[in-house]
Amino acid sequence: MESSGSEPPVTPSRYESQKRRDWNTFGQYLRNQRPPLPMSHCNCNHVLDFLRYLDQFGKTKVHVPGCMFYGQPEPPAPCTCPLRQAWGSLDALIGRLRAAYEENGGSPETNPFASGAIRVYLREVRECQAKARGICFKKKKKKPTTMEMGGGREDSSSSSASPFGFS
């Protein structure tokens, strides 16, 4: 039996599928604006509006400062505080949209998902949610590894810098 020469379709990874779904969702959000907004006119303010819009579909309870459970990691009873998108979900979403923007022809210099305003917003969401749950988000010092203590050869992969440009 002869092969037709064409490869079977490759199933995209979970990440690639989610990135495409997120990109399509953001595009639909822009098209639903009145008037509809072309991607070429999108800026970080539109991205921030999108992130706030997504909060209505969140599943993470975020206690408000006046709530008697504010600052408690495991509240003993239900309350009326709002559900929001979890910080980690928003952070991952922005990472996927940032990559999708450039894969779809956008320039890294004009990428609205890479804006400093987006990083500030995500940091504020993380801090707000941490306080609401009584969790302190202080950076932890890494324990020195055997290699860093002189017990072996150090290579570039043991650098303390994040491979994603965050510290």
Image: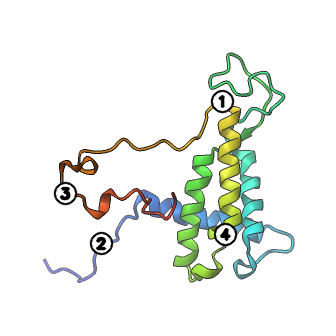
Asked if labels 3 and 4 touch by Cβ distance under 8 angstroms, the answer is no
Q: CA distance from mark 2 to mark 1?
A: 51 Å
Which circle, 3 or 2, is nearer the viewer?
3
x 34%, y 69%: residue:
10
**Which of the two discs, 4 and 2, labels the residue nearer the N terminus?**
2
Residue at the spot x=37%, y=64% of the render? 11
First in sequence: mark 1 vs mark 4:
4
Q: Label 2 crowding class (10 Å Cα cut-off): few <14, some 14-19, many 20+? A: few
How crowded is the residue under tag 4: few (<14 C-alpha within 10 Å), some, or many (20+)? some
Report the amino acid beneath label 1: Gly
Mark 3 vs mark 2, CA separation in Å: 44 Å
| Kind of residue indicated by mark 2 | Pro
Judge by depth and name the residue closer to the eye, 79 or 147: 147
Which of labels 2 and 1 is toward the front?
1
Query: Are dots 2 and 1 in contact, CB under 8 Å?
Result: no
Q: Earlier in the sequence, mark 3 or mark 1?
A: 1
Asked if the residue at tag 4 contacts the one at tag 1, i.e. Cβ–Cβ closer than 8 Å, the answer is no
Local packing at callout 3 (Cα closer than 10 Å; few below 14, some 14-19, many 20+) is: few
Q: Which mark is residue 3?
A: none
Residue 104 position, x and y percent, is: 56, 79
In three-dimensional space, the C-alpha distance between marks 1 and 4, rounded to whole angstroms, equals: 29 Å
Position of residue 66 relative to residue 103, above or below, is above
Residue that label 2 marks = 8
- Residues under labels 4 and 3: Cα distance? 38 Å
Q: Are marks 3 and 1 in contact (CB under 8 Å)?
A: no
Residue linked to disc 4: 115
Q: Which mark, by number, is residue 134?
A: 1
Mark 4 or mark 3, earlier in chain: 4
Q: Is 39 on the left or on the right of 94, as rendered?
A: right
Residue under pointer 3: 153
